[in-house]
Amino acid sequence: MTNLWDKYLSSDEEKINNLITNYKYFLNHGKTERECISQVIKKAEEQGFKSLDYYITNKIKIESGSKIYVENMHKAIALFVIGKDDIEMGMNILGVHIDSPRIDLKATPLYEKENLAYFNTHYYGGIKKYQWVTLPLAMHGVIVKKDGTMINLNIGENLAEPLFCITDLLPHLAQKQLQKEGNNIIEGENLDILIGSKPVKNSKDCNLVKENILKILQEKYNIEEEDFISSEIEFVPAGEARDCGLDKSLVMGYGQDDRVCAYTSIEAFFNVENPPKTISCILVDKEEIGSVGASSMKSKFYLDAIDEICSLMNKPLPITTSRILKNSKMLSSDVNAAYDPLYANVMDKATASYLNKGVVFCKYTGSQGKSNSNDANAEFLAHIRKIMDDAKISYQVSELGKVDIGGGGTIAYILANENVEVIDCGIAILNMHAPWEITSKIDIYEVYKCYLTFLKNA
Ligand code: MN
Ligand code: MN
């Protein structure tokens, strides 16, 4: 297949540039699940969406044209636009995750060692630990006080603010370290974050550096040490998403797995007017740790939301929900490992996904015997081929890595278990799960067009 950049006319350039500018803004202001969700809610409300609670409290009937969003625990959201057709005919659903690998804090994180203060951490998701040392890190998240007051933290993105770092050993003294297996070069317990070195003045206590840090936390942010018990603090790479390459054809940024699919899904979703079928978009948390918990795709919140919508449409339960799900189609989107010529031996060239070749469809994920994968139906794939070809969307079909090497989970199987037709879909990415990931601008544009086509025509 040819390089997509060949296919584009100069008239597309402005559209691509606008999309990418807004995408980079979304990444820069969405480095945690909560930050992504608040951006999406803001946009939804501007577009006339109302929360499901609003419909319920005000006993507003849901009908064709209704725009509804359901937020779950500030870390997941589902959106619906009710179509002209009977909702029992099913929905066209886009699903993505918005959590990304990062460094989380332990429950009582603050400690001092030899006059240096640190945060003790527990990393989140599948990372190569050695990639996360000696980088500028920023502190994002929330602390909830006992009275329920929420303190939002975002420290390290602005040049005037400090940033943070996990230190590493100098090469001169690292002979033994460098002989270790890659996974142990940096131990998980050593991924602690340096946060200070200055002692508090005029005190006789020990741990004066830690005391000084506590003083700053108290004075500047109204945070007590015990407040960390009820916090969700994420340390993420500090800095903005930027163009990558002399030709500026790529985007380098943190958290593109899977916010690249989240952004393009939302953008396409908000751009569909008066859909024939009901359309829905789901952004969930906790995919990187196995889709478990209340804010994950496995949470009941999505199915409950459909139940609530049915009852506000005076439809009988639970039969309507089952019918809706049975007739629904879903693109479960996630990033796919882009073919990297420098690491060709782990890929099967024939089924790898490539940068600049458009949307990636994956009939099944999993590995070593398709273990735990959602294997999409041939009939559904035929339907997808038809609508994508009719709309001239460029796509590639692929698997993640060689048969006995590859594999990775997605959220696809979860709604498939509820009897929805689901296929894995997404975009090729380099450096997956590294602090800075790389995608292609032209692929992002193509994925956006693919979602528009699916929502309108599936
Ligand atoms: Mn992912
Ligand atoms: Mn991932």
Image (cartoon, grey):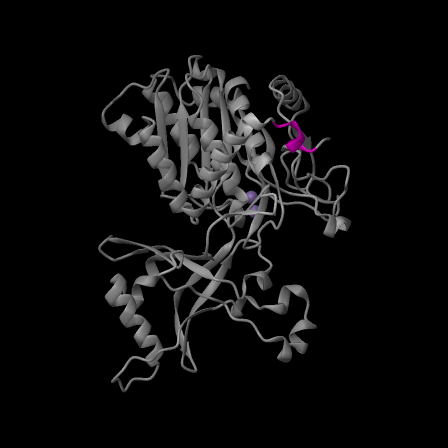
**Residue found at x 76% / y 48%:** 344
Residue 118: give x, y in percent of width and height.
Answer: 42, 71
**Residue found at x 58% / y 75%:** 169
Residue 89: give x, y in percent of width and height.
Answer: 49, 15
- Residue 424 in the figure: left or right of residue 456: right
**Residue found at x 43% / y 47%:** 28
Q: Quadrant of residue 37?
A: top left
Residue 391: give x, y in percent of width and height.
Answer: 60, 19
Q: Which residues are magenta?
A: 3-8
Q: For the C terminus, which image quadrant?
A: top right
* 327 shown above or below 432: above
> In the orientation shown, which residue stands out farthest toward the bottom?
204
Q: For the N terminus, which image quadrant?
A: top right
Helix, strand or loop: magenta stretch: helix
Residue 85: give x, y in percent of width and height.
Answer: 44, 12
Question: 297 or 222: nearer the eye?
Answer: 222
> In the orientation shown, which residue stands out farthest toward the top?
85
Question: 51 or 213: nearer the eye?
Answer: 213
Residue 419 appears in the picture as rendered: no
